[in-house]
Amino acid sequence: MSHISDEALVPADCRFNLLDHDYGLNSYKESHMPGAVFFDMEKDLSSLNKSGGRHPIPSVEAFKRVLEDRGISDKSIVVAYDDDGSGAARLWFLLEYFSLANGYVLDGGLKAWLRARGSMSDKVPARRRSSVQLEERREMIIEKDRIETHTSSFYLVDARSPDRYKGEYEPIDRIPGHIPSAV
């Protein structure tokens, strides 16, 4: 907590709820870590106008604009947090995918921060627009056709709850169950 006022440190609030798209922003407005900027799963961490699933990876240009609008540069240390592990992991993945080296996920998320008596704020930080250089690491992504032709050499892991994997409960997707060969 002693580095919370460090200029390079950018706490990133990534709270998100798949069933309530306003949850993250409303939670951020109510209170967040001091100096935190907000990232919206739908608008900032995805390109919903692209094909490729529920939350396709944004283009380099779109993600660059999102980071620069929040004052994130190549020298920034971005610490992503949320209250369930999904949004923070998504931001961390995108920072890795776009070759931004100093991205982290807060261990234990917001709950751990609050347990450690970390302070909260409702003030939106005034951060100056920055410049950041990004480069896609396309080798981190595998296309559907490659998986289909090499199913014996890949493990496709479905990280959803067991009841969603089995198709017993599906609150979101049109087709319940899992991709054939997924474990």
Image (cartoon, rainbow, N blue to C red):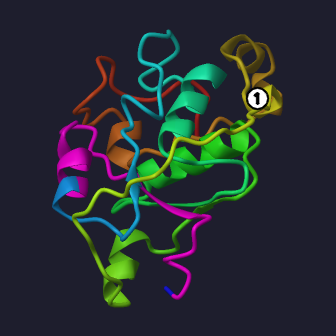
Residue 108: x %, y % from top left: 45, 74
Residue at position x 35%, y 69% from top? 33
Callout 1: helix, strand or loop? loop
Q: Give the residue at mark 1.
A: 136
Residue at position x 78%, y 31% from top? 135
Left or right: residue 36 compared with residue 158:
left
Quadrant including the C terminus: top right
Q: Is residue 59 visible?
A: no
Quadrant in the picture for residue 7: bottom right
Residue at position x 40%, y 61% from top? 36
Residue at position x 22%, y 36% from top? 21
Residue 153: x %, y % from top left: 83, 31
Residue 61: x %, y % from top left: 62, 21
Left or right: residue 179 compared with residue 8:
left
Report the magenta residues as a range. Answer: 2-28
Left or right: residue 165 compared with residue 61:
left
